[in-house]
Image (cartoon, grey):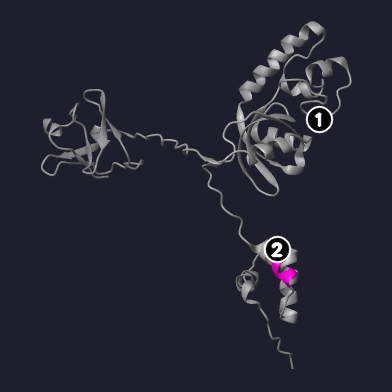
């Protein structure tokens, strides 16, 4: 006969117990502790706290809240993170040296920032791969001859080329623009303390969300394919005519007799055109209705 296990759940961990039993993830720690609870019917405080930490939902941060709205913080990141950023944004070079212009959010593992490629000042390692700069050309330009090949910018051959090369690289960095990236804390080689200091010394601000207007779609129809009912003021396709595009938003109707295309604006009654009556003079008085 199977032994009946009496379960003991402290009051303060009742919700943790429910979350643990309903857990459908693959995290071994939670699964192992749940098996332990099923077998013995109880857990230690340390085990309850571990489960609580693992199954507790992450707080959802308002995307319009910015931790640091305006800043210019130079950072250096690992070569692997730089390669990922370059690949994700189709940049022609790996950005090991970056300039942080905004700090958007952070968690225990990563910091989300708006950054751009930084080509200012002097560096002791390659701006693209982080390796040591050994010859005079790489030390003068901040990038080695291998990394510069992807940029299609002619490398320096003499000291007189340095100014021209730096101008070309700065122009390239400007053209690459700003991007939003998430950088793991361990990937910071330099600048992490400056970013954290800026976060602690600034009050989060709310910025207005950017609303991208939906482009208006227009469809063009031929008047010869429609029948006009003056009594009911309806315009409907003739028998055998198939209208493929749905009538949503403003529409254009083409009159093959006059060779003119007239735009009809959608409203709650139908589609109307006041300035250029297409069918009859009555169009100037009331909107027409399109039945498709």
SS label for mark 2: loop
Q: Is residue 211 visible?
A: yes
Q: Is residue 48 magenta?
A: yes
Q: Relative to 231, is 246 on the left or the right?
A: right
| Residue at far right of view | 134
The location of residue 85, given as percent across then percent down, is 69, 35
| Residue at far top of view | 160
Q: CA distance from mark 1 to mark 2?
A: 37 Å
Picture quadrant of residue 274:
top left
Picture quadrant of residue 219:
top left
Q: Is residue 95 visible?
A: no
Pick whichever, 274 or 207, lies toward us. 207
Q: Main secondary structure of the magenta part?
A: helix
Residue under the image location 77 percent in, 8 percent down: 161
Pick whichever, 262 or 90, lies toward us. 90
Stretch of the chain drawn in magenta: 45-49
Residue under the image location 82 percent in, 22 percent down: 144
Residue under the image location 47 percent in, 36 percent down: 210
The location of residue 74, given as percent across then percent down, is 70, 29
Residue receiving disc 2: 26
Q: Relative to 125, is 81 on the left or the right?
A: left
Residue receiving disc 1: 130
Neighbour tally class for label 2: few under 14, some 14-19, many 20 plus, Cα within 10 Å: few
| Residue at far bottom of view | 1
Q: Could you tell me which quadrant the C terminus lies in?
A: top left
Picture quadrant of residue 136:
top right
Q: Could you tell me which quadrant the N terminus lies in?
A: bottom right
The location of residue 205, given as percent across then percent down, is 53, 40
Neighbour tally class for label 1: few under 14, some 14-19, many 20 plus, Cα within 10 Å: many
Q: Is residue 120 magenta?
A: no
């Amino acid at each position: 006969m199977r032994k009946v296990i009496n379960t003991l759940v402290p009051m303060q961990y009742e919700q943790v117990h429910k979350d643990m039993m309903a857990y459908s993830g693959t995290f071994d720690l939670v699964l192992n502790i749940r098996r332990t609870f099923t077998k013995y019917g109880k857990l230690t405080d340390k085990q309850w706290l571990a489960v609580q930490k693992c199954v507790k939902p992450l707080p959802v941060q308002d995307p319009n809240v910015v931790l640091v709205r305006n800043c210019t913080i130079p950072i250096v990141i690992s070569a692997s993170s730089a390669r990922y950023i370059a690949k994700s944004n189709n940049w022609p070079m790996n950005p090991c040296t970056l300039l942080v212009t905004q700090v958007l959010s952070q968690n225990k593992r990563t910091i989300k920032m708006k950054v751009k490629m930084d080509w200012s000042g002097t560096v002791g390692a390659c701006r693209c791969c982080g390796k040591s700069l050994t010859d005079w050309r790489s030390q003068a330009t901040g990038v080695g001859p291998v990394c510069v090949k992807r940029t299609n910018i002619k490398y320096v051959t003499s000291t007189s080329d340095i100014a021209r090369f730096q101008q070309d690289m700065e122009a390239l960095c400007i053209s690459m623009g700003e991007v939003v990236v998430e950088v793991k804390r361990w990937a910071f080689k330099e600048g992490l303390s400056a970013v954290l200091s800026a976060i602690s010394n600034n009050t989060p601000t709310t910025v207005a969300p950017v609303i991208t207007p939906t482009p208006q779609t227009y469809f063009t129809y031929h008047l010869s394919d429609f029948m006009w009912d003056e009594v009911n003021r309806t315009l409907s396709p003739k028998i055998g005519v198939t209208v493929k595009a749905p009538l949503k938003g403003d529409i254009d109707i083409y009159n093959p007799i006059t060779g003119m295309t007239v735009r009809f604006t959608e409203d709650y009654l139908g589609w109307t055109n006041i300035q250029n009556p297409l069918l009859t003079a009555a169009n100037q008085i009331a909107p027409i209705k399109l039945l498709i």
